[in-house]
Amino acid sequence: MSLKGWLLFSPWIITFLVFWLFPLVYSFVLSLTDYRLLSTDINWTGMKNYVRLFSDPDFIIALKNSFLFVIGTIPFTTAIALGLALLLNERFRGRTFFRAAYFMPSITTMVVIALIFSNLYARDGYIHLLARMAGLSPPENGFLLSTKTALASIMAMDIWMASGYYMLLFLGGLQTIPIDLYEAARIAGASRQQQFWHITLPMLKPVTLFIIVINSIKSFQVFVEIFVMTKGGPLNATFTGVYFVYETGLRQFDFGYASAAAYVVFAVIGLASLIQFKLLRTEWRS
Amino acid sequence: MKRCVWITIILPLALLSCGGQKTNQVSISWWHFWTDAHIRPVVAQMVDDFEKEHPGVSVELVDLTWADGHDKIAIAYSSGSGPDIVELGSDWILEFSSTGHLENLTDRVQPFHDQYLMWEPGEYHDSLFAFPWILGTRVLFVNCDLLTQAGYDSAFSPRDWPELMAAAQAVSERVQGAYGFGSNSAERHRLYKKFLPFLWSNGGEVLSGDGQECLLGSPEALEALEYYITLCKTGLTDTQRRLEDAFLEGKIAFLISGDWLLKRLENEKCDFKYVTQLIPPPKDGMSSASFAGGEYLALNARSQHKDIAFELIQHICSAKNQLRFCLANRTPTPSSKEASADPAFVAQPHFDTFIRQLSSSRTTPAHPKWVYIEGKLEKAVEEALYGTKSPEQALKDAKAAIKEILIQ
């Protein structure tokens, strides 16, 4: 590349090197030390932080909750997004309005949504009221203060929020499917159901893979919701991997340990994405 | 035309260069947290006064927010920079003093020791590292209307734990839609602050005086936790913010809270009668301990202008400036004894309750590993509150866990 080219690229490259690559490498180095913020005394500890992590009950709970969060949201978000996309792909009056309406939550600030839902879930909140009217017995002090419902409540909010965005991706995917495929199928006498299972779904595979991978990564990284709504409580019921990193790093200043935790979370995400790619790719080929 | 262009370019440059020509100018920086529109000008005014009294000194005032201020300070200090003067919350001082980032003020504050309250949070290894500025404590807020509705005399105020419990239960049972006591639910870094006053009032301690031993296994600690859990169960359990909202709506009879609630009660014009009183002790006649915190001013160990910076700290903490600040901010608890004895100041509604409570208030134990100890204590209260463990078992487990932390 010419000098001019590099020059044009440099703002991005410099930001990438300084704010992404350097912290990434440096935090790995730190994860092998006992570095604490504010302290000048750093000792090399090798893999000790990593060993300590896997015998730390809090970290095990955090990883478990992160997994629960991913497993409990991805299928629902994907199914709802696909359902909405199919509906909104049809021609009817007000279609644009609904498309915009469902997309709205994903462009709203997370903190705002989390605060609104905190109130909805509270003991005198609207969702609590609805549950009581439906004859259910919701937790007495509100959904977020019960160990049984706290994580599920945040997951439900996340599904509500994310579905609109992935709907839009599915809509894009639907519009790339050639009309001739459906025409040919109709001539051959395929029902609408058959068309869905044998044309729409297989043709949407690349989009679906993309959505599942991206959404899994985002869900593993869940933080803002937790920070605003429960701070990991009650009794660690919503304590997740990234929240663990925050607590150890910026609350307890145990930077080495927090860096090690961050790397384990990173490895878990990487591994999960790899498995998803493998599974969905082979299916596609067959 | 051409001349006009030249003038517009050169004139600002000339002016700029003039601005930089002041020689022998000493510049000190102060990082603070008072950014609200009603108090920021007061802080700026104090700084202006100081600059007028000290020609040649300029003070750079930097605003921090509670959201990320602490992180900014930590990062600045660990990178070797950081302001000359920094405002620190009482429970932050130790992490900076124990790592050598703060100047030892022991000799400098000697003449002021008797004039100010609450030096303890600034202590580390028998030295002092922070100057107390604006303090805070929690008192009991009482909704008198709810008590009257529950059949109590309008002048009633609970004198000890059993009376508080009985009154709270009466309100919960007799007044439709109201709760006796507002207690905090599991909120990280907050719940333990709610339990500590009960523990301390009952004669219990988390750590022994030398910080070597955990004392949560004592009968006093168990009694305090059992009382706290029962009190919680007779009332409303929610987050601090929502509890305060509920009190303002007139739904809670008793709530332990700080001066910020007083501010809200004054601003939001509530239509019920309320009073503030000292937190009741376990038995009538004993004194009760409350949880105190506050804002402290500390000096950077690397500062080039320590003498003048300390003069600024003195100036900010002077009785005159504390009165000015506290009246503007409606804070009843300045650190200056002279300020908190000022007759006009004490005459402000409810201020005397806070001033009296402050004298029997304590701060978080100053222990380098407190952040870990706090987590274990909080876990015990949480487990007892959610019934996953009996109070006895929860405290026993916490004691074992804290013992391990202390050995490490």
Image (tube, coloured by chain):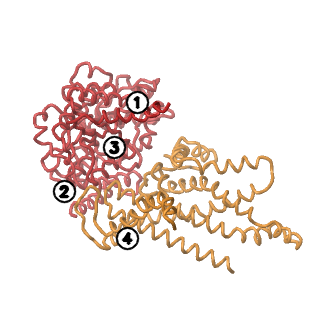
Chain colours: A orange, B red
Q: Is residue A91 above or below residue B234?
A: below
Three-letter residue code for mark 3: Lys
Q: Say left or right for A17 vs B74.
A: right
Q: Chain of mark 1?
A: B
| Residues at marks 4 and 2 touching, judged by CB atoms closer than 8 Å | no
Q: Chain of mark 4?
A: A
Q: For marks 4 and 2, give the one nearer the viewer.
A: 4
Kindly indicate the quadrant of the structure image that contains residue B330: top left
* Residue B194 marker: 3
Q: Say left or right for A218 vs B359.
A: right
- To which residue does mark 2 refer? B213
Helix, strand or loop for disc 4: loop
Neighbours of disc 4 within 10 Å: few (<14), some (14-19), many (20+): few
Three-letter residue code for mark 2: Glu
- To which residue does mark 4 refer? A54
* Residue A49 marker: none
Q: Is residue A3 above or below residue B375?
A: below
Residue B286 visible in the current orientation: no
Q: For marks 4 and 1, give the one nearer the viewer.
A: 1
